[in-house]
């Protein structure tokens, strides 16, 4: 996140895309990370474990911020972000961030698959195209 007027994802994309970076600095101490399963995890080790598969791909992360909604005194924001890792996986995240006393934005809730169906309903081809595997009949 940036320390400028509105939250951004510059630092987040660099940190998530670089195995040697201190990713936890992107999160508030009691932050939640919501993996594709939809079951949130908390704490340094659990969040690092959930980010590990993204880092293991060793591919660049590209991000396009779709929407930013700032609330309160300008210190809380909802982010809707389209992201892709090297054409292998893509989704739309819904994240909540808060600006700290130091001016930096940090995740309160990091939900990289926040706007996507559950993974047991979709899989992704090598080209990143979703295809239905199982799940409710009303889903495409």
Image (cartoon, grey):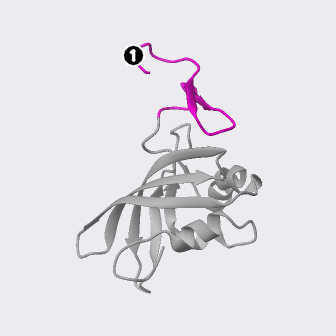
User: Split into 4 quadrants, where in the image is the C terminus?
Assistant: top left
Q: Is residue 131 magenta?
A: yes
Determine whether, in the image, residue 9 is placed left or right of residue 55: left
Q: Is residue 129 above or below residue 107?
A: above
Q: Residue at x 23, y 76 (%)?
A: 73
- Residue 36, horizontal then vertical, whole percent: 56, 40
Residue beneath disc 1: 138
Q: Residue at x 44, y 86 (%)?
A: 102
- Residue 34, horizontal then vertical, whole percent: 52, 47
- Residue 89, horizontal then vertical, whole percent: 62, 44
The tally of labels here is 1
Q: Is residue 71 magenta?
A: no
- Where, by quadrant of the figure, is residue 55 drawn? bottom right
Secondary structure mostly seen in magenta is: loop
Q: Nearer the viewer, residue 56 or 34?
A: 56
- Where, by quadrant of the figure, is residue 127 drawn? top right
Q: Is residue 55 above or below residue 40?
A: below
Q: Nearer the viewer, residue 131 or 54?
A: 131
Disc 1, SS: loop
Q: Residue at x 65, y 55 (%)?
A: 51
- Where, by quadrant of the figure, is residue 47 drawn? bottom right
Q: State which region is magenta.
A: 117-140
Q: Is residue 87 above or below residue 117?
A: below
Tell me if mark 1 has few (under 14), some (14-19) or many (20+) residues whose alpha carbon lies within 10 angstroms of its own. few
User: Which residue sits furthest bottom?
Assistant: 102
């Amino acid at each position: 996140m940036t320390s400028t007027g509105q939250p951004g994802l510059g630092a987040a994309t660099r940190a998530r895309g670089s195995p040697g970076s201190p990713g936890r600095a992107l999160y508030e101490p009691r932050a939640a990370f919501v993996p594709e399963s939809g079951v949130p995890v908390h704490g340094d080790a659990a969040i690092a474990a959930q980010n590990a598969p993204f880092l293991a791909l060793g591919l660049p992360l590209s991000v396009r911020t779709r929407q930013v909604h700032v609330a309160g005194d300008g210190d809380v924001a909802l982010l809707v972000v389209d992201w892709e890792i090297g054409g292998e996986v893509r989704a739309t995240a819904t994240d909540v961030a808060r600006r700290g006393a130091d001016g930096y934005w940090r995740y309160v809730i990091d939900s990289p698959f926040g706007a996507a169906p559950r993974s047991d309903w979709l899989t992704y081809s090598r080209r990143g195209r979703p295809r239905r595997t199982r799940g409710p009949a009303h889903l495409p």
